[in-house]
Amino acid sequence: MGGKSFELVGRISPLEHTDTTFALFQPTTNTRDAQIESRTGISASATKITSLRELLDLGEDIEIIGIDEFHMFAPGDVYVIRELMKRGVKFIISALDLDYRGEMFPSICELLRLSPTELVYKKAACTRCRHFTAGHTQMLLGDQPVTTGLSQVLVDDGSYVYAPRCLACFVWPDR
């Protein structure tokens, strides 16, 4: 769809043929995949973690850390990224920036405060108009946008479908 996992795997895969020490992680709350998997079919093994605090237990020799679905981690855990960056660790992070209400995930706000040296913003193909400008995630029940009764908790019980939408096709929730 948008290529964020594809980008992460594409940047990490060449490291397998070097002496660079690296590790890949994704949140345990990502139950869709057992590994980092792009919808294009490429994949990479990753360790599931509950909290970014677990990264503090990594050895001192780690040079690069890849994190998939970063938006699923707690915003308070971003201090771990800052501390490891102070040690010289580099990060390649893949995430959504906006939730199904069109609001920025708190963990992404905290991450951006660290002033990343590079930011690659990927768009997806809108599932409604098919233009490659989707930056929003629409929550659907059946094929209808859910616009009322939304809470901050992202429902992931299989009742809803999440679809990429461009700004023109995104139906904003009631506020």
Image: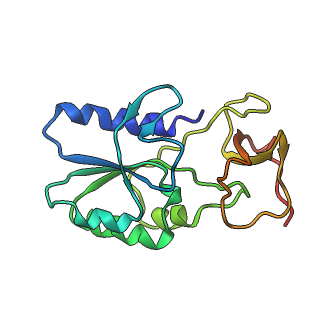
Q: How many labels does the image show?
A: 0
Colouring scheme applied when the structure was drawn: rainbow
Please tell me in which quadrant of the rendered image residue 54 appears: bottom left
Residue 107 drawn at (x, y percent): 52, 65
Q: Residue at x 33, y 52 (%)?
A: 91
Image vertical order of residue 96 relative to residue 131, above or below: below
Image vertical order of residue 165 relative to residue 77, above or below: above
Give whichever of 119, 141 is nearer the camera.
Answer: 141
Q: Residue at x 68, y 61 (%)?
A: 103
Q: Residue at x 66, y 56 (%)?
A: 99
Give whichever of 142, 90 is nearer the camera.
Answer: 142
Please tell me in which quadrant of the rendered image residue 109 appears: bottom right
In-image side of 25 versus 130 (left or right): left
Residue 127 drawn at (x, y percent): 74, 33
Residue 143 drawn at (x, y percent): 83, 39
In-image side of 173 versus 115 (left or right): right
Q: Which residue is drawn at 47% across and 55% down?
A: 70
Q: Quadrant of the N terminus?
A: top right
Q: In which quarter of the image is the C terminus?
A: bottom right
In-image side of 148 versus 84 (left or right): right
Image vertical order of residue 113 relative to residue 46, above or below: below
